[in-house]
């Protein structure tokens, strides 16, 4: 990649693709503005749609807000993503003629099942976990069909040969995409947490694709970042609008497919480097499934307040951070700083040193160890002399934090 006379030149498959520097900013700003304006529209019209769009269950097990809030931010995020390829294909004078609008629309089409399943839950409060999971499976299959987005390798000895078989590759991709999609929904629960995580993760993968000269994946990352930033203008720090399940599934799917396409289209980028960037939400969803199914003997879809970010809020933010009456959202907003700092640090290290498989694997393991260490600290209320795996994995009960 080089810059000459105000244009960015990408080298990809022995060809040169040029895009104006202004076009890169146009993509980001257009997505941001569209998302922000639709977010504002949702808020100012809430009196007419609040009867079905409000998150009224302020006493739910995972709820930390005190007033009803629209949870239809997914519509604003959809608008932010949709407007960029629409302008790109319209021949508008903005510097968007280099945008791969067809490719973006294909990915949006693939995201439709997951988005609709999430919006159905947001508007009716009656969507089953199984229905949403099947919808994410359908979206992953559509992306594989429309964009060839199925994993060709995992950079794991022995398994990569199996991925040469399309059914095996497709099956692993579908479960991986569904897992990452749901991971964004799991970390969504405090102002700015899921949105901040998505921005940082997409920035990391977008930078890697920029280095590799992959203009399309970089565009996908930029559009996702812009749409999320526009939504965050109303979500953080005061929480005037929630992304809901629709927004979480849309962004989670977008992140998952950017990750898959980065691996598919750029053989020089190893799978573990991408996993190191996405590690926090992935570790959270895997550990949550283990805690619910194995430790608590409940359904993996049952909500609880034992996520790491939930424990941080209850054991640190609520006890250490002052909360003035005129700013009741301060403690809630502090959780996003914790999560975003973690992910930003991991992303920076993954970009700088994760280009070898051994270094990337080490980064993933370090994050897993850090997660377990901090989780034990928040459960017990003090630092342990050594990591107590019995507490982390539920082999020994800890009465100090109730399961509900």
Image (cartoon, rainbow, N blue to C red):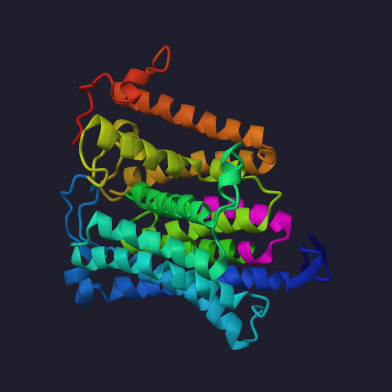
Q: Main secondary structure of the magenta part?
A: helix
Q: Which residue is at the front of the view, 314 or 245?
A: 245
The picture places residue 122, in percent across and down from the top left corner, at 25, 64
Locate residue 397 relative to residue 38 in the image: left or right: left
Determine if residue 240 is in view.
no
Up the image or down, 314 lies above or below 236; here it is above
The magenta span reads 199-217
Work out which residue is located at the far right of the displayed protein and give it. 4
Where in the figure is residue 397, as x and y percent of width and height? 23, 21
Residue drawn at (20%, 52%), measured in percent from left and top?
66
Does residue 80 appear to the left or right of 249 in the view shown?
right
The quarter of the rendered structure image containing the N terminus is: bottom right
Residue 312 vs 344, above or below: the answer is above
Q: Position of residue 246 (x, y in %)?
A: 34, 64
Q: Where, by quadrant of the figure, is residue 358 drawn? A: top right
Name the image quarter holding residue 23.
bottom right
Query: Is 83 situated above or below 194?
Result: below
């Amino acid at each position: 990649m080089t810059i000459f006379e105000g244009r960015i030149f990408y080298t990809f498959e022995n060809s040169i693709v040029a895009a104006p520097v202004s076009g890169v900013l146009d993509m980001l700003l257009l997505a941001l503005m569209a998302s922000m304006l639709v977010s504002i529209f949702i808020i100012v019209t809430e009196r007419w749609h609040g009867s079905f769009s409000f998150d009224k269950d302020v006493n739910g097990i995972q709820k930390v807000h005190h007033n009803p809030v629209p949870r239809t931010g997914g519509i604003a995020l959809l608008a932010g993503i949709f407007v960029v390829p629409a302008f790109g294909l319209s021949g508008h004078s903005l510097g968007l003629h280099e945008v791969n609008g067809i490719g973006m629309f294909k990915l949006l089409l693939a995201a439709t099942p997951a988005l609709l399943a999430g919006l159905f839950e947001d508007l009716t409060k009656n969507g089953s976990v199984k229905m949403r999971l099947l919808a994410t499976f359908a979206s992953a299959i559509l992306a594989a069909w429309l964009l060839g987005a199925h994993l060709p390798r995992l950079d794991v000895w022995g398994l990569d040969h199996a991925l040469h078989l399309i059914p095996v590759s497709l099956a692993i991709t579908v479960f991986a995409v569904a897992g990452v999609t749901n991971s964004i929904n799991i970390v969504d629960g405090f102002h700015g947490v899921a949105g901040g995580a998505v921005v940082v993760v997409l920035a990391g993968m977008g930078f890697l694709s920029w280095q590799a000269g992959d203009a399309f994946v970089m565009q996908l990352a930029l559009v996702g970042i812009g749409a999320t930033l526009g939504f965050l203008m109303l979500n953080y720090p005061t929480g005037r609008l929630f992304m809901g399940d629709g927004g979480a599934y849309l962004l989670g799917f977008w992140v998952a497919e950017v990750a898959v396409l980065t691996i598919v289209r750029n053989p020089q980028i190893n799978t573990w480097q991408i996993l190191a960037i996405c590690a926090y939400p992935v570790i959270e969803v895997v550990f949550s499934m283990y805690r619910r199914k194995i430790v608590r003997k409940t359904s993996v879809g049952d909500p609880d307040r034992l996520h790491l970010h939930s424990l941080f809020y209850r054991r640190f933010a609520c006890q250490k951070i002052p909360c003035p009456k005129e700013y009741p959202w301060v403690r809630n907003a502090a959780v996003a700083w914790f999560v975003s700092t973690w992910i930003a640090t991991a992303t920076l290290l993954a970009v700088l040193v994760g280009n070898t498989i051994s270094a990337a694997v080490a980064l993933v393991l370090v994050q897993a160890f850090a997660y377990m260490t901090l989780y034990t600290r928040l459960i017990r209320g003090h630092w342990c002399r050594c990591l107590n795996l019995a507490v982390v994995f539920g082999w020994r009960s800890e009465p100090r934090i109730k399961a509900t």
